[in-house]
Image (cartoon, rainbow, N blue to C red):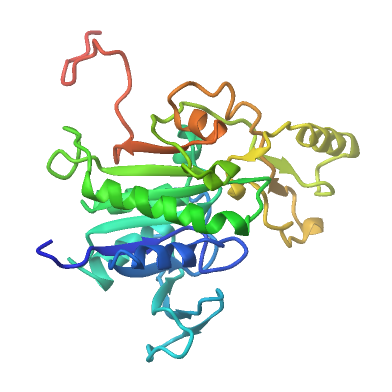
Amino acid sequence: MNGCPIRVLLTNDDDPPARDSPYVLSLYLELKKFGWDVRVVLPASQKSWIGKAHAIHDAVYGYYFYPKGDGTGERRDVPRLLEDGEVGEWILLDGTPATCTNIALHNLYPGEIDLVVSGPNFGVNTGTAFVLSSGTIGAAMSGALSQVRSIALSYGNPRGKSLPEYIAPTQALAGRIIKRLWENWGTDKRGLRQNEVDLYSVNIPLTSQLLRPDGMEVCWTTLRSNSYGQLFRRQQGDIGMDHAESDTVLSATTNSNQPNMSLDNQLQPRSEPHLQRSKLAFTFVYSPDMRNLAHPPLDGTDTWAIINGRASVTPMCAAFCSGGDAEIVAGTTWGW
């Protein structure tokens, strides 16, 4: 980089500083401590679990955002000079996380970004079921597909709560991990960029290990292969649902036995949808059954690390990797 500061794009899927996005501002300030040039382009509203989607038929509108150190800020249609207490000029787009990354890399700051950091997500993203769904991973994947080094960062919140006493040590650890990855980026012969690892997924559990004198252990991990079941339940009272069926559905979702360590705060519905149920034949609300998502926690996987109170760093390919048995040779003609 010839002595120039590292140019970082910071994005997420949880919107600007708010209840659903309590860590993005402090991460921004942590990365600035390295002397890095940090540009911020975020979705204007919550976009969890949208993966790497782009809404290609919608125009994307943008705004300027001027955050203050206390997490408040002003949205503006036109840029202006910073005022007292403001820490920077950010951009908000009403697009998906992946769209924010792509527009930032190719339209707002073309050729000006060295590293994409997506997050911190409010909830971990471990295992293939979450990784394939996560907007945080999707934004980092979008960066990797544009051949820019990318890191997805997620924080595990027990019971989905923000824990103020853990913010400083968590951000310090995240900064150290990001800096070390940047300075020692791994190799992968399948990589899109000159045999480099395409992207990393970093997960940090917010637990008391962060407060130990020697800090939290950090482990190299692999993705745990897992799956999920029913994600939606039928809303009680819609047309076509009788009383017995409604009771059955509600009973099934009440006994989901989800683990104490919230695998992803995204899984909790933000609020009941405001639908005119009397006019709809069907109404379904997000109510996931995640009983088999984390158990058993296979050794060496990202889920195993989080459950054991360790931070995980997982190298990833920007691809849905080929499947099938090893003896299948690409290009072989079928024999009927």
Q: Residue at x 69, y 34 (%)?
A: 258
Answer left or right for 40 relative to 196: right
Q: Residue at x 54, y 36 (%)?
A: 309
Q: Position of residue 135 (x, y in %)?
A: 46, 51
Q: Position of residue 152 (x, y in %)?
A: 39, 49
Residue toward you, 309 or 325: 309
In this rendering, the answer to whether 94 lies above or below 303 is below
Q: In this view of the protein, can residue 57 be seen by the observer?
A: no
Q: Residue at x 38, y 91 (%)?
A: 80
Residue farthest along the left direction in this orientation: 2
Q: Position of residue 280 (x, y in %)?
A: 74, 54
Answer left or right for 294 relative to 260: left
Answer left or right for 6 relative to 298: left
The quarter of the rendered structure image containing the C terminus is top left
In this rendering, the answer to whether 208 lies above or below 335 is below
Image-quadrant location for residue 118 = bottom left
